[in-house]
Image: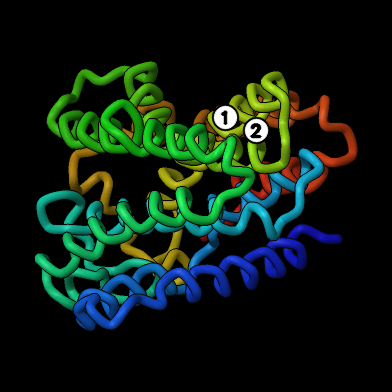
């Protein structure tokens, strides 16, 4: 099956699961529920939850079994986007082609929607992931990737780097390994665990995820410089305005592209032991640096 068709089928399954997981009890305030659904169900690429399903399938598991983890991953990612867009952070007013959550609702509701998504993600993991023997490991994987030494720590380091003109390439990569790479790698580990992966396969999937995560960030940096707002569905050319150090600002456009290709080659090499089952993961890795939005 061609990658676009395959991804469309996965996204449909993910969308169904996300709608199921946001059928809130009546005692959830309606404005909060509306705010959560507004961002979580907005059209998106769903790369991270797709990777959960793809890793599970590549390890011999059933996609159905990995849907709760895919939903949880997307909830954590969406919470991070809602909070990143706030005036105190990146101060964006456009996300996925629509007004950002705090613009559509208000800042306080947006903060609470993010908080709600983060906590709901772990409830979904604990309640619905099977077999129960892997639940604790899945919870730990996601918590570590999203936490103070992962995505949250990476975001803090990224904010501090805005006022640091001396940041080096290794320092920039360290930021993005936490901010982007760890959550993406967790997608692979969760899917692998549910698919019954052995420790060596989990390690291979982690290397793939970390490498694709960095390549994804480089591609985003390039799109911020070269992309178009109507295709991206979010503001472009904002990094330079915020004084952010990015891969293009440090390496230039062509060297950034070369670095992204190198990382994708590394990712694909890591999952070579999966044999024919790695085909869709390999195709997705290539797509990451070829996308135009």
Q: Is residue 277 above or below residue 262?
A: below
What residue is shown with label 1? 211
Could you tell me residue 237's position as x and y percent?
31, 54
Q: Are marks 1 and 2 in contact (CB under 8 Å)?
A: yes
Look at the image and tell me whether residue 174 can be seen. Answer: yes
Residue 253 placement, left or right of 151: right
Label 2: how many residues lie within 10 Å, few (<14), some (14-19) or many (20+)? many
Quarter of the image with the N terminus is bottom right
Look at the image and tell me whether residue 181 can be seen. Answer: no
Compare residues 78 and 66 and report the one nearer the observer: 66
Compare residues 127 and 292 and report the one nearer the observer: 127
Residue at position x 70%, y 19% in the image:
200
Q: Nearer the viewer, mark 1 or mark 2?
A: 1
Q: Earlier in the sequence, mark 1 or mark 2?
A: 1
What residue is shown with label 2? 264
**Colouring:** rainbow
């Amino acid at each position: 099956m061609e990658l676009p068709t395959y991804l469309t089928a996965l996204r449909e399954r993910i969308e169904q699961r996300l709608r199921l997981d946001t059928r809130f009890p009546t005692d959830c305030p309606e404005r909060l529920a509306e705010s959560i659904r507004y961002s979580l169900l907005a059209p998106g690429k769903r790369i991270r939850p797709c990777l959960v399903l793809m890793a599970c399938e590549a390890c011999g598991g059933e996609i159905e079994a990995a849907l709760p983890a895919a939903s949880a991953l997307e909830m954590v990612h969406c919470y991070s986007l809602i909070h990143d867009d706030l005036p105190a952070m990146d101060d964006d007013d456009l996300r996925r082609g629509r007004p950002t959550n705090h613009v559509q609702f208000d800042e306080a509701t947006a903060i609470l929607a993010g908080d709600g998504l983060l906590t709901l993600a772990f409830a979904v993991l604990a309640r619905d992931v099977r077999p129960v023997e892997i639940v604790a490991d899945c919870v730990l994987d996601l918590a570590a990737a999203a936490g103070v030494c992962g995505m949250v720590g990476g975001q803090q380091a990224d904010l501090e780097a805005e006022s640091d003109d001396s940041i080096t390439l290794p320092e920039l990569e360290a930021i993005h390994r936490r901010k982007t790479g760890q959550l993406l790698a967790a997608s692979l580990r969760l899917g692998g665990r549910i698919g019954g992966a052995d420790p060596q396969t989990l390690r291979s999937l982690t290397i793939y995820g970390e490498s694709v995560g960095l390549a994804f960030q480089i591609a985003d940096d390039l799109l911020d410089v070269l992309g178009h707002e109507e295709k991206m569905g979010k503001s472009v050319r904002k990094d330079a305005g915020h004084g952010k150090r990015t891969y293009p600002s440090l390496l230039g456009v062509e060297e950034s592209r070369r670095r992204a290709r190198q990382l994708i080659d590394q990712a694909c090499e890591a999952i070579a032991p999966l044999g024919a089952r790695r085909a869709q993961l390999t195709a997705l890795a290539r797509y990451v640096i070829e996308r135009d939005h």
